Image (cartoon, rainbow, N blue to C red):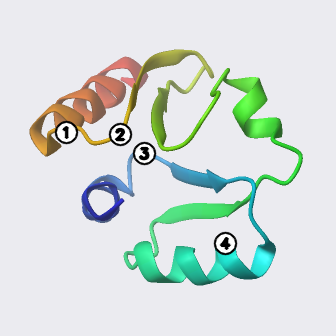
Amino acid sequence: MPVIDELAAEYGDRIDFVAPAWKSTPEATFARGNELLQSGKIFWGLDEEEEVFSAYGVPYQPVTVLIAHDRTVVTEWAGMQDPAEIEAWLNELIALAG
């Protein structure tokens, strides 16, 4: 998450960053969100009913899903990713929104 938070600080004016959590409590989610998401550029919260995860077919955490402005999934990956590759995907999203 620190890499995504850094990229959110850089790209947050052009891309919305959302970090839902599941299988937790509101208190634990709040504490962890405040710990990991320092930029203030990531919308986060607890998806208690797993609606967000279901909507995009995400079966587990951690996973990153890049969703275009028309709500189609552009790509997804589990676990860590090279920051340069993430940045390339973010630039692709910006180009798609063109």
Quadrant location of the C terminus in the rendered image:
top left
Q: Are marks 4 and 2 in contact (CB under 8 Å)?
A: no
- Decide: is 48 above or below 97: below
Nearer the N terminus, badge 4 or badge 2?
4
Query: What residue would you read off at disc 3?
Result: 15
Any mark on residue 71, and which?
Answer: none
How many numbered discs sit on the rendered protein?
4
Secondary structure of the residue carrying tag 4 is helix
Task: For marks 1 and 4, give the one nearer the viewer.
Answer: 4
* Percent of width and height locating residue 11: 30, 52
**How many other residues sit within 10 Å of disc 1, few (<14), some (14-19) or many (≥20)?**
some
Secondary structure of the residue carrying tag 1 is helix
Determine the CA span between mark 4 and mark 2.
Answer: 19 Å
7 lies left or right of 93: left
Secondary structure of the residue carrying tag 3 is loop
Task: For marks 3 and 1, give the one nearer the viewer.
Answer: 1
* Amino acid of disc 3: Ile
Secondary structure of the residue carrying tag 2 is loop
Determine the CA span between mark 3 and mark 1.
Answer: 12 Å
Task: For marks 2 and 3, give the one nearer the viewer.
Answer: 2
